[in-house]
Amino acid sequence: MLREIHILTLFPGLFEGFLRESILGKAIADGKISVAVRDFREFAEGKHRSVDDVPFGGGSGMVLMPGPAVAALESLPPGTRKILLTPQGRRFDQAAARRLSGEERIGFLCGRYEGFDERIRAFADEEISIGDYVLSGGEVPAMVVVEAVTRLLPGVVHNEESVVEESFAAGLLEYPQYTRPRSFRGVEVPEMLLSGHHEEIRKWRRAEAIRRTRERRPDLAAELPPEEEE
């Protein structure tokens, strides 16, 4: 089970509020998870502590040098699963979150500028992307992965049943949710949810989750077994 998260970044201040607030902040305060953030510029040499340089062969932008990045990765505790956050990585999903929550330690290297010197990749265990778009760096992706992974740990989310029922937990989008008032601007809460028949409500929610998944994420619905489609 995950106990430690290490984040290597050039902008550690970006994580201050994120790690202090909400469910994650409480989990850290309660000792359920430890998160360490380190500026990997500390591993750079020379007067200016440079971590990037112009690309060989020409081109725009700057590239992260292998020396500081690799030294930072090698500084992580033994047994840490080392992860590069890069658009070239495997797409992050709920299954990956569950897998990473089973590691004892994970460490992230947040990319910046035009990307990593190719030689850095050999010192990581895997590469992760959170989507097919461009961000300024790997800090926001690190926050996404940390949030998704830590909320799967026992005791982090107080109502652990809600984690099981959320979107993607069973390969489906979540069923529609309602709360008070029963009527809002002419739209009523479905009568089934007011019936008190728990087994029928469970079946209704399952059917609605499948319907919503087929409508909004046909790619996920295509992976459902035949009996679910029926």
Image (cartoon, rainbow, N blue to C red):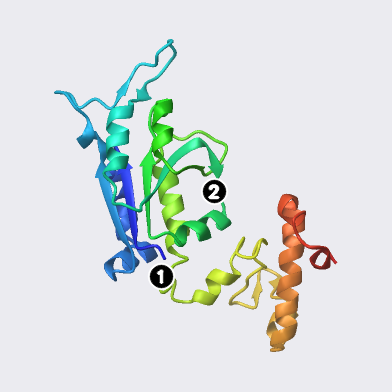
Label 1 residue SS: loop
Kindly indicate whether the residue at mark 1 contacts the one at mark 2 (C-beta within 8 angstroms).
no
The residue at the point 75 percent across, 56 percent down is: 221
The location of residue 162, given as percent across then percent down, is 54, 73
Asked whether the viewer can see residue 136, the reply is no
Quadrant of residue 153 within the rendered picture: bottom left
Considering every residue shown, the one lying at the far top of the view is 57
- Up-down relation of residue 22 to residue 66 (above or below): below
The mark that comes first in sequence, 2 or 1, is 2
Quadrant housing the C terminus: bottom right
The residue at the point 71 percent across, 73 percent down is: 205
- Up-down relation of residue 193 to residue 225 (above or below): below
Report the amino acid beneath label 2: Phe
Nearer to us in this view, 163 or 58? 58
- Up-down relation of residue 173 to residue 45 (above or below): below
Reading the image, the residue beneath label 1 is: 156
The residue at the point 64 percent across, 78 percent down is: 182
Determine which of the numbered discs, if any, sits on residue 92 in the image. Answer: 2
Q: For label 2, count other residues whose C-alpha is less than 10 Å away and answer few (under 14), some (14-19) or many (20+).
A: some
Considering every residue shown, the one lying at the far left of the view is 47
Report the amino acid beneath label 1: Val
The residue at the point 29 percent across, 69 percent down is: 31
Quadrant of residue 75 within the rendered picture: top left
Considering every residue shown, the one lying at the far right of the view is 230
Q: CA distance from mark 2 to mark 1?
A: 21 Å
Label 2 residue SS: loop
Asked whether the viewer can see residue 150, the reply is yes
Quick check: 190 left or right of 178? right
The location of residue 73, given as percent across then percent down, is 32, 41
The location of residue 88, given as percent across then percent down, is 53, 34
